Amino acid sequence: MKTAIFSTHKFEKDYLVKANGEKHLVKFIDAHLSYETVELVNGHKAVSIFVNDDASSRVLHKLKDLGVQFLALRSAGFNNVDIKAASEMGIRVARVPEYSPYAVAEHATALMLALNRKLIKAHSRVRDSNFSLDGLAGFDMHGKTAGVIGLGKIGRIVVKILNGYGCKVLAFDITEDKEFAKKYDLEYVTIDVLCEKSDIITLHVPLNEGTKYLINKDRINKMKPGVMLINTGRGGLLDTKEVIKALKICKIGYLGLDVYEEEQGLFFEDHSDEILQDDVIARLMTFQNVLITSHQAFLTDTALQNIADTTIDNLDCFEKGTSCKNELK
């Protein structure tokens, strides 16, 4: 089946080639899928997209007109896809529901440790032959209260890691698993109580209408002074401008981000020879207590292979006309 793969990155291409073998006639496209680039799919029956590609209604209409019948996401999240519009047009959509929850969970806790122990600052000092320890004091994770928002597969692994550190773990989720809570000494609370009592808060929920700006001015005001906030979910979970205000007055003492609300066209690309046009992320980058990675929490060899294998499996199902367990309806 002729398939156009948008937003192809060097880090994933070999995995996709290996998983595909000679099954599908694949066209790798560096560009993002957008209203302006959609014509590149002409003659292809299927399209594969990544997290920052645009599969809004107007793009889907153009895809439909060009003969595209299938959309294979190389991600778990699908907030960039108008699922209702795709269904109405008869375009089948499938995602990669999980690739390595350990990868994302481990990255979230790595951000915690790096911020806490000021590892980036310490490394920079040593490279300049400055071996002073002044200003590098952190805190023991043991005994701190950590709040985990969202207990899906990633959130549960984060709970296990934090439990291993000796943290008191609070959690907010729409459902409660009493057996899991008992095993890991976990307490379910409301999101507002979690914000009030946690020294560390980490986000692991999908982005939708109900979670947009989940962390907003009111919830930030409820947090402890100097709280650590970690987001490896989706950028839109945070009201970034309110977060910046909180950083300026030290209400938020540490911020770790692997995602950003306006990351499309910014993350996954090299802009080192350009003037940064995004004033909001530029402001974030001026804080020494902010650590930003460019949506790399998923980036392990295990995850990349799983993403590639599942994507090709989804395309196989589409081509055969069989049901697909990863299909979004």
Image (tube, rainbow, N blue to C red):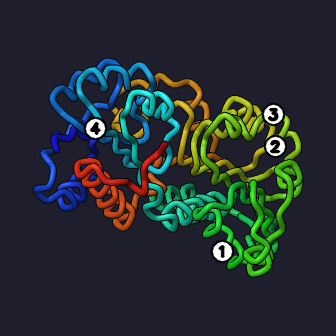
Which is nearer the N-term, disc 3 or disc 1? 1
**Residue highlighted by disc 4:** 47
**Does the image show residue 181?**
yes
- Are the two marked residues, 2 and 4, in contact with CB atoms closer than 8 angstroms? no
The percent position of residue 251, horizontal first and vertical second, equals 81, 43
Where residue 153 sits, quadrant-wise, is: bottom right
Which is nearer the N-term, disc 1 or disc 2? 1
The percent position of residue 305, horizontal first and vertical second, equals 31, 63
Which is nearer the N-term, disc 2 or disc 4? 4
Mark 3 and mark 1: Cα distance apart in space: 30 Å
Observer-nearest of 285 and 185: 185
Mark 4, Cα crowd under 10 Å, few <14 / some 14-19 / many 20+, is many
Q: Tag 2's secondary structure?
A: loop
**Residue highlighted by disc 3:** 217
| Placement of 48 over or under 170, stated as above or below | above
- Are the two marked residues, 3 and 1, in contact with CB atoms closer than 8 angstroms? no
Image side of residue 133 versus residue 40, left or right: right
Nearest to the eye among marks 2 and 4: give it: 4
Mark 2 and mark 4: Cα distance apart in space: 44 Å
